[in-house]
Amino acid sequence: MVKLIFLLCALTSFACTWMLLRAYLRSRARLLMWSALCFAGLTANNVLLVLDRLVFTGMDLSTWRLVLALLAVLLLVTGQVLGDDR
């Protein structure tokens, strides 16, 4: 059951990335681009979580996951600070 939840979280964040990127390509609103980049980082974070918990059980990838999540959120904060020109 845990494996399914981890995979569903990764798929959900990928779907959010895809929809945000598609919306950005249609409207060219910069905030959508920053949000898509944030969710791309969160998708990578979820994939790393799957690898950490299910594949590489002998290794601890929690530091890399935290750094990746921090970078993803910093991308979104950057988009908020820079604002949107539309």
Image (spheres, helix red, strand yellow):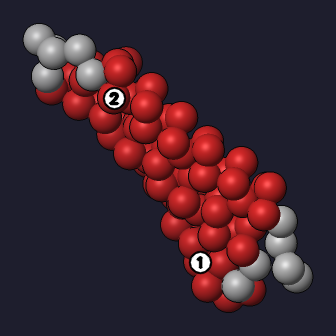
Quadrant housing the N terminus = top left
Relative to 75, say whether 21 is above or below.
below
> Which mark, by number, is residue 64?
2
Could you say whether the residue bearing mark 2 is in a helix, strand or loop? Answer: helix
Which quadrant holds residue 25?
bottom right
Instruction: Find the distance from the CA under tag 1 to the CA under tag 2.
Output: 28 Å
Mark 1 crowdedness (10 Å alpha carbons): few <14, some 14-19, many ≥20 = some
Res 48 quadrant in image = top left
Task: Locate the C terminus by quadrant.
Answer: bottom right
Task: Mark yes or no: residue 66 visible.
Answer: yes
Horizontal side, residue 40 vs residue 35: left or right: left
- The answer to whether residue 18 is above or below residue 44 is below
Question: Is residue 53 found left or right of 73 in the rendered image?
Answer: left
Q: Is residue 8 visible?
A: no
Quarter occupied by residue 61: top left
Q: How many numbered badges does the structure rendering display? A: 2
Q: Residue at x 35, y 21 (%)?
A: 63
First-in-chain label (1 vs 2): 1
What residue is shown at x 78% (from left), y 63% (from top)?
Answer: 82
Which residue is labeled 1 in the image? Answer: 22
Three-letter amino acid code of the residue under disc 2? Trp
Q: Residues within 10 Å of mark 2 (few under 14, many from 20)?
A: some
